[in-house]
Image (spheres, rainbow, N blue to C red):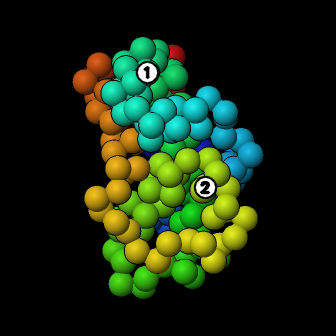
Amino acid sequence: MNSCLSSFSQNFPGYDFFTKVHLLMLKQFTPENIPDGFWEAIALARNDYEQFVELLQKMNRGTLIRFCWNYEEAAAYFKAEPYLNYVDPALSEDGIDDLCKSIVGKGKDYYIQVVKNPKLMPSDIDLSDPALRILSEAILEYNKRYDEPVPYRGDSFA
């Protein structure tokens, strides 16, 4: 456990690991922080998936990690109020995770619309949505190349 998360655990002992990670990410993240290059890669994935996979294969280790982190942070933005107020309460935690990731995978314009207007938050997930493959593809590429999971933000990957 990194020192930042350890310090957080001491100050907020009642929170589980995933809530801690989510709160730490939100503390540092704003939608405006998402680089244009990230959104260009998302647009490529939506328009030409094979070219997107080739782009992932050309990314160096740090760029691939940052792509995954940007994706996770962008999705995590919706895992809090007011956005969760519009989600079907029967949706599982995994379902909420997929729902948030699908918003990111639909591209910058859609993402910003939902950020600005929480009422546009989808209430349920369409598991056949190709947007759900984007992050998985990046994680698979990383695992294949480096034979290890994508490091958590804050871990050293130099």
Question: Looking at numbered disc 2 in the image, what kind of residue is underneath it?
Answer: Tyr
**Residue situated in front as seen by the camera: 58 or 144:** 58
Q: Hey, which quadrant is residue 35 in on the image?
A: top right
Q: Can you say whether 25 is above or below 14 in the image?
A: above
Q: Quickly name the residue at label 1.
A: 55
Q: Quickly name the residue at label 2.
A: 111
In the displayed structure, does residue 51 sit left or right of residue 75? left
Residue located at (52% from left, 38% from top): 43
Q: Are marks 1 and 2 in contact (CB under 8 Å)?
A: no
Residue located at (44% from left, 41% from top): 46
**Residue situated in front as seen by the camera: 30 or 124:** 124
Q: Can you say whether 139 is above or below 101 in the image?
A: above
Q: Position of residue 5 (x, y in %)?
A: 55, 49
State whether residue 11 appears in this view: no
Q: Can you say whether 114 is above or below 85 in the image?
A: above
Q: Position of residue 137 (x, y in %)?
A: 33, 36
In the displayed structure, does residue 63 sit left or right of residue 56? right
